[in-house]
Amino acid sequence: MGAWFFFPGPRHKNGTRPQERKGWDIEQEWSALFRGKAFITDLGAEQQAQVSGETVTVGRYAVWTPDGEGHRIIEVGADLERLRLTHKVGMENVCVLVRR
């Protein structure tokens, strides 16, 4: 079983993505990219989860907004375009979950 990572969309000035550089620190990178900004995470597919003995569907996309020093999820859904427009999040701030 591999690990799960959210790879932020924006590229750096040198054209590489954060995970392509040696010494990459996800916490520092995340803070630098999204401090004070809303972003969306993409799980790649809707997921099923057990909650209190019932199976529930977890939406593919989650909208995160600034909350104090961090972020909190304010909406989850399956329609990326609607979530982006509603919360004014550009495609450069959509993070894709990949499994390695």
Image (tube, rainbow, N blue to C red):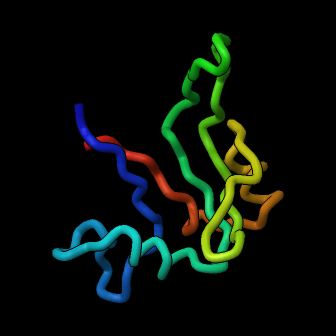
Q: How far across and down, in percent of the image, does residue 46 sit?
A: 58, 29
Q: Quadrant of the C terminus?
A: top left
- Of all residues, the one furthest to the front in this rendering is 52
- Where residue 4 appears, x then y in whole percent? 35, 44
Relative side of 26 to 8, left or right? left
Q: Quadrant of residue 63?
A: bottom right
What is the x, y in percent for residue 54?
Answer: 67, 12
Residue at the image point whose x is 46% and y is 51% from the top: 96
Q: Nearer the viewer, residue 50 or 97?
A: 50
Q: Is residue 2 above or below residue 57?
A: below
94 vs 62: above or below = below
Q: Residue furthest right?
A: 86
Q: Quadrant of the N terminus?
A: top left
Please report the residue visible at 68 percent of the width from the left and 47 percent of the height from the top: 80
Q: Quadrant of residue 90?
A: bottom right
Q: Nearer the viewer, residue 22 or 79?
A: 22
User: Going by the image, does 2 lie left or right of 75?
Assistant: left
Side of 63 where 14 appears, left or right? left
- What residue is drawn where x is 36% and y is 68%? 26
